[in-house]
Image (tube, rainbow, N blue to C red):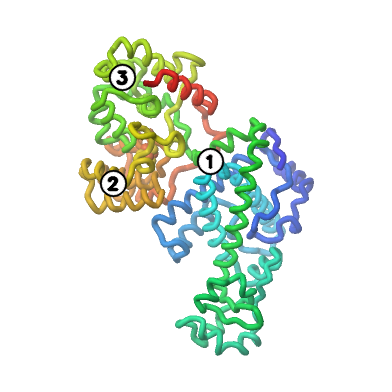
Amino acid sequence: MQFGGTPKPSASRRKRLRLADGLSDDLYPHGLMMYNRPPMCNITLQEFESFAYDRVKVLHYLDSLGVSYVKNSPDYCQKLGDYLRKNYVGFTLTSEPSKDTEERNLEWRRKDHISHFILRLAYCRSDELRRWFLEKEVDLFKYRFNCESTSSIKQFLMLNDMTYYPISEEEKEKFSAHLKLISYDMTQSKVQSTNFYKVPFTDVLNLVSSRRVFINSGYAYVPQSELISIISTRFREHLSKALAQTSRSLPELEEDDRLLPILRGFNKNTLAEAYDPNKNAGKVSIKQIDELSKISFPLCMRQLHQVLRETHHHKHWARLQYGLFLKGIGVTLEESIKFWKAEFSKGVGEEKFNKEYSYNFRHMFGREGKRTNYAPYGCMNIIMKNVPAPGEHHGCPFKHSSPELLKQRLHHYKIPKDSIDEIIKLMKSQHYQIACTKYYEVTHKVDEAGFQLNHPNQYFDESQMLLKGEKKTTGLKPSQGNAEFTPKWSQPVPESQTEESEMELDALMTEVDV
Ligand code: SF4
């Protein structure tokens, strides 16, 4: 792929690009892909970002859908289909015979192809990211495979050199007595209506060992419903290897300073994570914080507040996480210094605070150093970075606490037992933000939060709007993702920090830690 920084091309230019890039049926003969070949075309940086963000949104939606519904159940497929039709062009198309549709198909396949490869780059950086991406891509592949017609599957198999042939009606008739025996519910009429594929038996040893296929002349006769598990296993193996390979080529990519910040944004899953630090400036006074921490703080911040009140100290990551959060909810610099000084003075003393710590808080507000207006950290930043060591209290309790400790804490906050069980289940299945949303629903006594949680300050804002009667719950489940998405490049960017300046702040805080 080659990237240009020019504005989004006009329709005529897009057409020229398409011709120049040789966008044709030969390149994208089928809507479903194994993504064997990387894209070899020119795209603009804007396309690079918007294609990938659209796909990230779909993968996140799949993630939350998998919590509420059994995967591939009719409800799951219905919801996913509705979502894709509404939000993402590129998947599940009907083939209408007009020329216009053909062109759109090619455009959408191109988007599907390119966006997949961009996210490979973004999600190959750690085991955890690779695992998440792999799971979601396999889920998406399975759904799309199940949407394909028999003739389309046949074409897909042929294009990908998979030697799995649908058997003819005569062959089916010939072996119908044997095919009936592969499962208890396989009746004669079901045999007639099912499509069977001939697959080398070595590719389906699990089905052979559980006697769920008929074998003849080295081929297993696999019903179409089982075919997806074979193909998706191949898809998974292929993608898993490809992600490992991509991660090895990362050092080369690090040299491209146009792409790196964009890719980092994706793998932090930063949908809507940019938070304007000035949005609430001056709206909250320190006198309100004790009360607000109980009713409107997410658990991570409630915990940090409580620890600060009890121990009168925070180590540097906790200061950073909590200090920026307080700034985001509207505590001014003056109030902030007063608040931290009052606590630290009970521990390290006022003089030491003035000498060693107050500079940090002024720095957070952009009054020292490079004078950057730092934004509060989003959930994925808190979840993925800087794992707390023993004795540290920053991080996300849904990710970084043990289930026992979290259970104890929730019990202490008088969360009902069945809700605690549900939260712990979500936590164990690594759905940290959904667990946090559940905590919001229970503590705010609403059935459905009506927003997709990405940021502790968003949690606070939503809570305050609800408590002040400025917002009604929408009736949508959080997992239904009602948050509107605007690509980062078109968002109004507050004077928030770059990755570099964030690191600068981190380093500064580290220097003076005790
Ligand atoms: Fe905080 Fe986000 Fe974790 Fe909730 S999910 S506790 S807001 S980091």
Q: Nearer the viewer, residue 242 or 33?
A: 242
Ligand 1 found in image quarter: top left
Q: Which residue matches tag 1? A: 267
The tally of labels here is 3
Q: Secondary structure at mark 3?
A: helix
User: What crowding class fits label 3: few (fewer than 14 Cα within 10 Å), some (14-19), or many (20 or more)?
Assistant: many
Q: Position of residue 133 (x, y in %)?
A: 53, 49
Q: Residue at x 61, y 34 (%)?
A: 260
Q: Is residue 170 left or right of residue 404?
A: right
Amino acid type of disc 1?
Answer: Asn
> Do the CB atoms of the residues marked 1 and 3 lie less than 8 Å apart?
no
Q: Is residue 407 left or right of residue 203?
A: left
Q: Which residue matches tag 3? A: 340
Q: Residue at x 51, y 79 (%)?
A: 211
Q: Secondary structure at mark 2?
A: helix
- In the picture as drawn, the residue positioned furthest to the front comes out as 390
Give how far apart the Cα atoms at labels 2 and 3 are: 31 Å
Nearer-N-terminus badge (1/3) = 1
> Do the CB atoms of the residues marked 2 and 1 lie less than 8 Å apart?
no
Relative to 182, residue 202 above or below? above
Q: Residue at x 68, y 33 (%)?
A: 5
Q: Quadrant of the C terminus?
A: top left
Q: Is the distance from the Cβ of mark 2 to the nearest ligand 1 atom less than 8 Å?
A: no
